[in-house]
Image: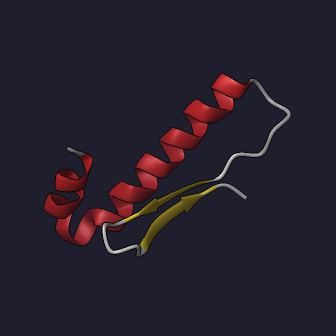
């Protein structure tokens, strides 16, 4: 469960969320094969933005 991993990450959860966002963006960009902008945002259950990857 990704949410459980964020909870277990404690003080490192923002760093984990950023790593997930960056990797998700790279996968999306590779899948789309160029010509499109991709932004990925990771939020916690309360709606707080934890990480953003993109422009």
Percent position of residue 36, x then y: 81, 39
**Quarter assignment of residue 8:** bottom left
Specify the quadrant that holds the C terminus.
bottom right
* Relative image position of residue 51 (x, y in whole percent): 48, 64
Residue at the (42%, 47%) spot, across then down: 20
How many marks do you count on the picture? 0
Return the residue nearer the eye: 2 or 15: 2
Where is the N terminus found, in terms of image quarters?
top left
What residue is drawn where x is 37% and y is 61%?
15
The image position of residue 42, as x and y in percent, is: 45, 59
Return the residue nearer the eye: 45 or 18: 45
Colour scheme employed for the rendering of this structure: secondary structure
Where is 37 relative to 11, above or below?
above
Quadrant in the rendering for residue 26: top right
In this rendering, is residue 1 above or below 5?
Answer: above
Looking at the picture, does residue 32 appear above or below residue 55?
A: above
Left-right relation of 37 to 9? right
Residue 35 placement (x, y as % from top left): 86, 33
The residue furthest right is: 35
Classify residue 41 as left or right of residue 32. left
- Seen in the image, is 43 located left or right of residue 53? left
The residue under the point 30% across, 67% down is 45
**Which residue is at a point 49% across and 40% down the rendered structure image?**
23
Extreme residue in the front direction: 46
State the residue in front, 28 or 11: 28
Q: Is residue 41 above or below residue 31?
A: below
In which image quadrant can residue 25 be found?
top right
């Amino acid at each position: 469960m990704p949410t459980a991993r964020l909870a277990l990450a404690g003080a490192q959860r923002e760093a984990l969320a950023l790593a997930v966002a960056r990797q998700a963006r790279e996968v999306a960009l590779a899948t789309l094969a160029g010509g499109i902008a991709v932004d990925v945002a990771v939020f916690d259950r309360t709606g707080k933005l934890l990480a953003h990857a993109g422009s």
